[in-house]
Amino acid sequence: MSDDDLLEKADEFANAISGALSKFTGEAQPFVASTTGERVTIRHEAAARGRATGIALKTEGRVLLSLVVEFDCTWDSSGNYLRVAKSRVVVYALERTDKEPLFRYDFERDPSGSIPGAHLQVHAHRDSFTHLLGFGGPHSKRARTRETKKFERTPSVSQFHFPLGGKRFRPCLEDILDSLREEFGLETGADWARVRDEARSEWRRTQLAAAVRDAPETAAEALRSLGYEVTGDAVDERLQNLVAP
């Protein structure tokens, strides 16, 4: 596959992101793909033009949050499919993307050190986070409930629930334990690394098998692309598992 093919695939991905965010915000949110060395970077058109601004997320016509979304993509190992090498989704308070964000979801396929490849970082002080929670709009039940009870109790950070991959792709216990070890410098048993790796691999194989049962035709297609012969009648997807948060 050529660089032009890579850019074409990235353009398709950019259009998909643009479509999702345009629907979410109710305004056109064009994303563009541009070549940077061996990678293609996908980002908002305004960012590609050098404007230090985010996507405005509004409630009742006022900007409550700003969003920055970027993906760096390459070919996968087969050279046939687009692969995300690095991504970031960053949420800021109000319209100030030059300040510390509230939180960010980062992914890096080849992370440095022992930082998890996919991770969530919360930057905000509790006061700024809870202040914004108290000014949410009326478009969800949880936000409306906070509004009606704002004189009874102050919102807490714990009321915000961060998604972490749903029932199939959530982190396992060993992922959490190892992040505590790394970040707090905890002492562990001499055999911890082996136990961690064995448990992680077993967990992910189990979840992979469950994901295959959720989308068997997708799994069959992936196996055929690797040269496997897959036979048998088509099986319906378990859509409720694929769309569950």
Image (cartoon, rainbow, N blue to C red):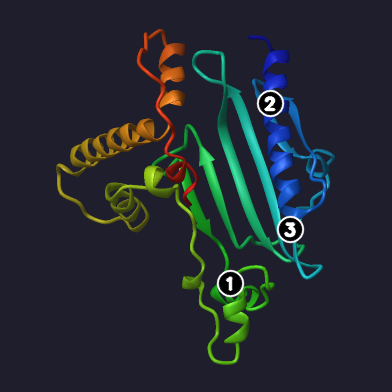
Q: Is residue 115 left or right of residue 88?
A: left
Residue in view at x 30 percent, y 49 percent: 178
**What percent of the width, then of the height, locates residue 84?**
56, 31
**Vertical side of 161 occupied by 2: above or below:** above
- For label 1, the residue is 141
**Vertical side of 150 occupied by 87: above or below:** above
- For label 3, the residue is 98
- For label 2, the residue is 10
Q: Earlier in the sequence, mark 1 or mark 2?
A: 2
Within-10-Å neighbours for mark 1: few <14, some 14–19, many 20+: few
Instruction: Calculate the distance from the C-alpha at mark 1 to the C-alpha at mark 2.
Output: 37 Å
Residue in view at x 28 percent, y 51 percent: 173
**Vertical side of 227 occupied by 14: above or below:** below
Instruction: Calculate the distance from the C-alpha at mark 2 to the C-alpha at mark 3.
Output: 27 Å
Q: Earlier in the sequence, mark 1 or mark 3?
A: 3
Q: Which dot, 1 or 3, sits closer to the camera?
A: 1
The amino acid marked with disc number 2 is Ala
The amino acid marked with disc number 1 is Lys
**Residue toward you, 144 or 94:** 144
**Residue toward you, 150 or 228:** 228
Task: Find numbered disc 3 in the image and state the secondary structure of the residue it sits on.
Answer: loop
Within-10-Å neighbours for mark 2: few <14, some 14–19, many 20+: many
Q: Residue furthest bottom?
A: 151
Split into 4 quadrants, where in the image is the N terminus? top right
Residue in view at x 82 percent, y 46 percent: 28
**What percent of the width, then of the height, locates residue 232?**
35, 16
